[in-house]
Amino acid sequence: GEDVEQSLFLSVREGDSSVINCTYTDSSSTYLYWYKQEPGAGLQLLTYIFSNMDMKQDQRLTVLLNKKDKHLSLRIADTQTGDSAIYFCAESAGTALIFGKGTTLSVSS
Amino acid sequence: DSGVTQTPKHLITATGQRVTLRCSPRSGDLSVYWYQQSLDQGLQFLIQYYNGEERAKGNILERFSAQQFPDLHSELNLSSLELGDSALYFCASSVTGDLPPNEQFFGPGTRLTVL
Protein backbone atom coordinates (compact mmCIF):
# COMPACT_ATOMS: atom_id res chain seq x y z
CA GLY A 1 0.00 0.00 0.00
CA GLU A 2 0.94 3.63 0.02
CA ASP A 3 3.48 4.83 2.55
CA VAL A 4 5.21 8.13 3.10
CA GLU A 5 8.40 8.39 5.15
CA GLN A 6 10.04 11.47 6.64
CA SER A 7 12.81 12.10 9.10
CA LEU A 8 11.37 13.22 12.42
CA PHE A 9 13.51 16.21 13.39
CA LEU A 10 15.59 18.96 11.81
CA SER A 11 17.37 21.72 13.66
CA VAL A 12 18.81 24.78 11.89
CA ARG A 13 20.04 28.26 12.71
CA GLU A 14 18.15 31.35 11.64
CA GLY A 15 19.23 32.48 8.18
CA ASP A 16 20.37 29.02 7.09
CA SER A 17 18.56 26.90 4.51
CA SER A 18 16.44 23.98 5.68
CA VAL A 19 15.93 20.86 3.62
CA ILE A 20 13.19 18.44 4.62
CA ASN A 21 13.16 15.11 2.86
CA CYS A 22 10.38 12.64 2.10
CA THR A 23 10.07 9.33 0.29
CA TYR A 24 6.84 7.89 -1.01
CA THR A 25 5.82 4.58 -2.48
CA ASP A 26 2.90 5.10 -4.82
CA SER A 27 4.31 5.83 -8.26
CA SER A 28 0.83 6.59 -9.55
CA SER A 29 0.44 9.61 -7.26
CA THR A 30 -0.30 12.56 -9.48
CA TYR A 31 0.37 15.27 -6.95
CA LEU A 32 2.62 15.58 -3.92
CA TYR A 33 2.03 18.15 -1.23
CA TRP A 34 3.75 19.92 1.62
CA TYR A 35 1.73 21.05 4.62
CA LYS A 36 2.81 23.03 7.67
CA GLN A 37 1.35 22.62 11.15
CA GLU A 38 2.07 25.18 13.83
CA PRO A 39 1.44 24.36 17.50
CA GLY A 40 -2.27 24.12 18.28
CA ALA A 41 -3.26 24.83 14.69
CA GLY A 42 -4.55 22.95 11.70
CA LEU A 43 -2.58 22.07 8.61
CA GLN A 44 -1.72 24.81 6.16
CA LEU A 45 -1.09 23.88 2.54
CA LEU A 46 2.31 25.31 1.58
CA THR A 47 2.76 24.05 -1.93
CA TYR A 48 2.27 21.08 -4.21
CA ILE A 49 3.99 19.65 -7.24
CA PHE A 50 2.65 17.72 -10.18
CA SER A 51 4.37 14.37 -10.62
CA ASN A 52 5.72 15.19 -14.07
CA MET A 53 7.63 18.21 -12.77
CA ASP A 54 11.15 18.16 -11.33
CA MET A 55 11.08 21.41 -9.45
CA LYS A 56 8.73 24.11 -8.28
CA GLN A 57 9.75 27.39 -6.67
CA ASP A 58 7.49 29.63 -4.64
CA GLN A 59 9.24 32.55 -2.92
CA ARG A 60 11.46 31.02 -0.22
CA LEU A 61 10.19 27.49 -0.89
CA THR A 62 11.69 25.12 -3.44
CA VAL A 63 10.27 21.66 -4.02
CA LEU A 64 12.41 19.05 -5.76
CA LEU A 65 10.97 15.80 -7.05
CA ASN A 66 12.98 12.77 -8.11
CA LYS A 67 10.31 10.50 -9.52
CA LYS A 68 12.72 7.65 -10.24
CA ASP A 69 13.76 7.44 -6.59
CA LYS A 70 10.31 8.53 -5.30
CA HIS A 71 12.03 11.27 -3.32
CA LEU A 72 10.58 14.67 -2.54
CA SER A 73 12.26 17.53 -0.74
CA LEU A 74 11.27 20.94 0.54
CA ARG A 75 13.94 23.60 0.80
CA ILE A 76 13.25 26.71 2.85
CA ALA A 77 15.68 29.50 2.11
CA ASP A 78 16.71 32.03 4.79
CA THR A 79 14.88 30.08 7.50
CA GLN A 80 13.23 32.25 10.15
CA THR A 81 12.10 31.45 13.70
CA GLY A 82 8.53 31.72 12.42
CA ASP A 83 9.22 28.70 10.23
CA SER A 84 9.44 26.49 13.33
CA ALA A 85 6.64 23.97 12.89
CA ILE A 86 5.90 20.42 11.82
CA TYR A 87 6.10 19.86 8.07
CA PHE A 88 4.12 17.07 6.46
CA CYS A 89 4.70 15.51 3.11
CA ALA A 90 1.62 13.93 1.50
CA GLU A 91 0.83 11.99 -1.62
CA SER A 92 -2.51 11.74 -3.36
CA ALA A 93 -4.21 8.36 -3.16
CA GLY A 94 -7.39 8.69 -5.12
CA THR A 95 -9.11 11.66 -3.54
CA ALA A 96 -7.54 11.20 -0.10
CA LEU A 97 -4.11 12.24 1.09
CA ILE A 98 -1.57 9.89 2.63
CA PHE A 99 0.62 11.79 5.06
CA GLY A 100 4.04 11.14 6.47
CA LYS A 101 4.56 11.35 10.23
CA GLY A 102 5.88 14.89 9.92
CA THR A 103 9.27 16.55 10.38
CA THR A 104 9.62 18.92 13.32
CA LEU A 105 11.71 21.91 12.24
CA SER A 106 13.36 23.82 15.06
CA VAL A 107 14.94 27.17 14.21
CA SER A 108 17.32 28.76 16.68
CA SER A 109 18.36 32.41 16.64
CA ASP B 1 -7.52 31.17 8.57
CA SER B 2 -8.45 28.46 6.04
CA GLY B 3 -12.17 29.21 6.09
CA VAL B 4 -12.98 25.73 7.43
CA THR B 5 -14.59 25.79 10.87
CA GLN B 6 -14.81 22.97 13.38
CA THR B 7 -16.67 22.72 16.66
CA PRO B 8 -16.07 22.06 19.44
CA LYS B 9 -12.39 22.88 19.84
CA HIS B 10 -11.99 20.49 22.76
CA LEU B 11 -14.09 17.59 23.93
CA ILE B 12 -13.56 15.48 27.05
CA THR B 13 -15.70 12.44 27.58
CA ALA B 14 -15.70 8.97 29.11
CA THR B 15 -15.24 5.52 27.61
CA GLY B 16 -18.40 4.08 26.14
CA GLN B 17 -19.89 7.47 25.31
CA ARG B 18 -20.88 8.93 21.95
CA VAL B 19 -19.85 12.33 20.57
CA THR B 20 -20.52 14.38 17.45
CA LEU B 21 -17.94 16.59 15.81
CA ARG B 22 -19.06 19.29 13.42
CA CYS B 23 -17.41 20.85 10.38
CA SER B 24 -18.36 23.67 8.04
CA PRO B 25 -16.41 23.73 4.77
CA ARG B 26 -15.10 26.81 2.99
CA SER B 27 -17.73 28.71 1.07
CA GLY B 28 -18.13 27.06 -2.33
CA ASP B 29 -16.40 23.80 -1.43
CA LEU B 30 -18.49 20.71 -2.08
CA SER B 31 -16.21 18.07 -0.64
CA VAL B 32 -15.45 17.38 3.01
CA TYR B 33 -12.81 15.03 4.41
CA TRP B 34 -12.22 13.76 7.93
CA TYR B 35 -8.77 12.87 9.24
CA GLN B 36 -7.59 11.56 12.60
CA GLN B 37 -4.22 12.63 14.02
CA SER B 38 -2.78 10.55 16.84
CA LEU B 39 0.74 10.19 18.19
CA ASP B 40 1.14 6.57 17.17
CA GLN B 41 -0.74 6.49 13.85
CA GLY B 42 -0.01 10.00 12.59
CA LEU B 43 -2.52 11.61 10.25
CA GLN B 44 -4.95 9.11 8.80
CA PHE B 45 -7.73 9.62 6.30
CA LEU B 46 -11.11 8.50 7.59
CA ILE B 47 -13.81 9.39 5.07
CA GLN B 48 -14.80 11.82 2.32
CA TYR B 49 -18.17 13.23 1.33
CA TYR B 50 -18.97 15.07 -1.85
CA ASN B 51 -22.17 17.07 -2.18
CA GLY B 52 -23.95 14.94 0.41
CA GLU B 53 -22.76 11.53 -0.73
CA GLU B 54 -19.97 9.32 0.54
CA ARG B 55 -17.11 9.42 -1.97
CA ALA B 56 -14.21 7.54 -0.38
CA LYS B 57 -13.52 5.59 2.78
CA GLY B 58 -10.22 5.13 4.58
CA ASN B 59 -9.33 3.62 7.93
CA ILE B 60 -12.61 4.43 9.58
CA LEU B 61 -13.82 2.15 12.37
CA GLU B 62 -17.32 0.72 12.27
CA ARG B 63 -18.05 2.61 15.50
CA PHE B 64 -17.53 5.85 13.57
CA SER B 65 -19.90 7.32 11.00
CA ALA B 66 -20.25 10.58 9.16
CA GLN B 67 -22.69 12.47 7.03
CA GLN B 68 -22.86 15.62 4.97
CA PHE B 69 -26.02 17.69 5.08
CA PRO B 70 -27.75 19.69 2.30
CA ASP B 71 -26.08 22.89 3.53
CA LEU B 72 -22.77 20.99 3.07
CA HIS B 73 -21.72 20.96 6.70
CA SER B 74 -20.58 17.59 7.95
CA GLU B 75 -20.74 15.69 11.21
CA LEU B 76 -18.51 12.88 12.42
CA ASN B 77 -20.15 10.60 14.98
CA LEU B 78 -17.95 8.54 17.26
CA SER B 79 -19.64 5.95 19.45
CA SER B 80 -18.66 3.38 22.10
CA LEU B 81 -15.58 5.48 22.67
CA GLU B 82 -12.34 3.85 23.79
CA LEU B 83 -9.22 5.37 25.29
CA GLY B 84 -7.44 4.86 21.97
CA ASP B 85 -9.90 7.16 20.21
CA SER B 86 -8.29 10.14 21.93
CA ALA B 87 -6.85 12.19 19.08
CA LEU B 88 -7.11 15.37 17.05
CA TYR B 89 -9.84 15.13 14.44
CA PHE B 90 -9.43 17.36 11.42
CA CYS B 91 -11.92 18.28 8.79
CA ALA B 92 -10.74 19.49 5.39
CA SER B 93 -12.60 20.75 2.36
CA SER B 94 -11.93 21.12 -1.32
CA VAL B 95 -13.80 22.53 -4.26
CA THR B 96 -14.66 19.35 -6.08
CA GLY B 97 -12.92 16.43 -4.40
CA ASP B 98 -11.50 14.80 -7.48
CA LEU B 99 -10.20 17.25 -10.05
CA PRO B 100 -6.46 17.71 -9.54
CA PRO B 101 -4.65 19.21 -7.77
CA ASN B 102 -7.52 18.79 -5.30
CA GLU B 103 -6.14 21.24 -2.77
CA GLN B 104 -7.52 20.40 0.64
CA PHE B 105 -7.91 23.15 3.23
CA PHE B 106 -7.88 22.07 6.85
CA GLY B 107 -9.84 23.31 9.83
CA PRO B 108 -8.24 23.90 13.26
CA GLY B 109 -9.30 20.48 14.53
CA THR B 110 -11.24 19.08 17.47
CA ARG B 111 -9.16 17.58 20.28
CA LEU B 112 -10.99 14.59 21.73
CA THR B 113 -9.91 13.20 25.08
CA VAL B 114 -11.49 9.95 26.26
CA LEU B 115 -11.03 9.25 29.98
Image (cartoon, coloured by chain):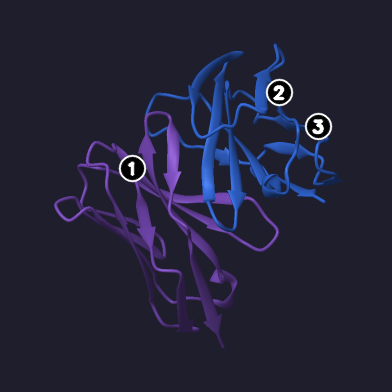
Chain colours: A purple, B blue
Secondary structure at badge 3 equals loop
Residue A108 vs B13, above or below: the answer is below
Residue B3 vs A66, above or below: the answer is above
Checking the image for residue B80, the label placed there is: none
- Marks 1 and 2 share the same chain: no
Answer with the quarter of the image where residue B26 lies: top right
Location of mark 3 (residue)? B18
Location of mark 1 (residue)? A2
- Marks 3 and 2 share the same chain: yes
- Residue at point 41%, 61% (across, down): A59
Question: Residue B43: x and y, percent?
Answer: 53, 48
Please identify, in this view, whether the residue under mark 1 or under mark 2 is nearer the observer: 1
Q: In the image, A65: left or right of A19?
A: left
How many residues crowd around disc 2 within 10 Å: few (fewer than 14), some, or many (20 or more)? Answer: many
Please identify, in this view, whether the residue under mark 3 or under mark 1 is nearer the observer: 3
Q: Pinpoint the chain carrying mark 1.
A: A
Location of mark 2 (residue)? B73
Question: Is residue B16 or residue A27 the one in the foreground?
Answer: B16
Q: In the image, A108: left or right of B75?
A: left
Q: Pinpoint the chain carrying mark 3.
A: B
First reached walking from the N terminus: tag 3 or tag 2: 3
Question: Residue B29: x and y, percent?
Answer: 58, 25
- Marks 3 and 1 share the same chain: no
How many residues crowd around disc 1 within 10 Å: few (fewer than 14), some, or many (20 or more)? Answer: few
